[in-house]
Image (cartoon, grey):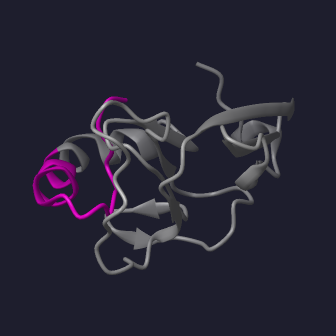
Amino acid sequence: AQKPLYCSTNDYYDCEIGCRKIAGFMEEHLKEAGVDLFLAGHLHNYERTWPVFRGAVEARSYSSPSAPVHAVVGMAGDVEGLSDKWMAAPDWRATKDARLGFAMLHFRNASVMEFEYVLSETGKVADGFTLTKSRLSDVVVL
């Protein structure tokens, strides 16, 4: 998506007003559809949540999450530069970073997906997580 449902960059409109409007409309649909990972850009940094629904962390694990994980993957940057000013850490934020990089998704099999945030300068993985589904019936292919 272009705009995130969750972000904590110190940007009042995008991370306070905008997120609430978009999340109020979309969040229920994402959970009902069994969406595991919601990727968004717009903000020029990297941020990842725990599985979260309506602002509440549902688990501090990525094993068969009951709510989507949200990641802002705008760390490729632009002429405006990266956004490195943050609000106080909300409970749902797992991590954040403001270095140039890119995201990679690796689908190991039908129930295992690995996410990596790779730094452009070094090629090293700065952050990552593995999302697993314990039951194949939980896997939804769209």
Q: Is residue 17 above or below residue 29?
A: below
Does the magenta run of residues contain 6? Answer: yes
Identified at 22% across, 57% down, the residue is 15
Q: Is residue 57 visible?
A: yes
x, y percent for residue 64: 71, 55
x, y percent for residue 71: 50, 48
Identified at 39% across, 36% down, the residue is 41
Q: Report the side of 104 relative to 99 (left or right).
A: right
Q: Report the side of 80 relative to 16 (left or right).
A: right
Q: Relative to the observer, which residue lies in front, 54 or 32?
A: 54
Q: Quadrant of residue 2?
A: top left
Residues in magenta, as a range? 1-21
Q: Quadrant of the C terminus?
A: top right
Q: Is residue 8 above or below residue 76?
A: below
Q: Quadrant of residue 17?
A: bottom left
Does the magenta run of residues contain 12? Answer: yes
x, y percent for residue 61: 69, 68
Q: Quadrant of the N terminus?
A: top left
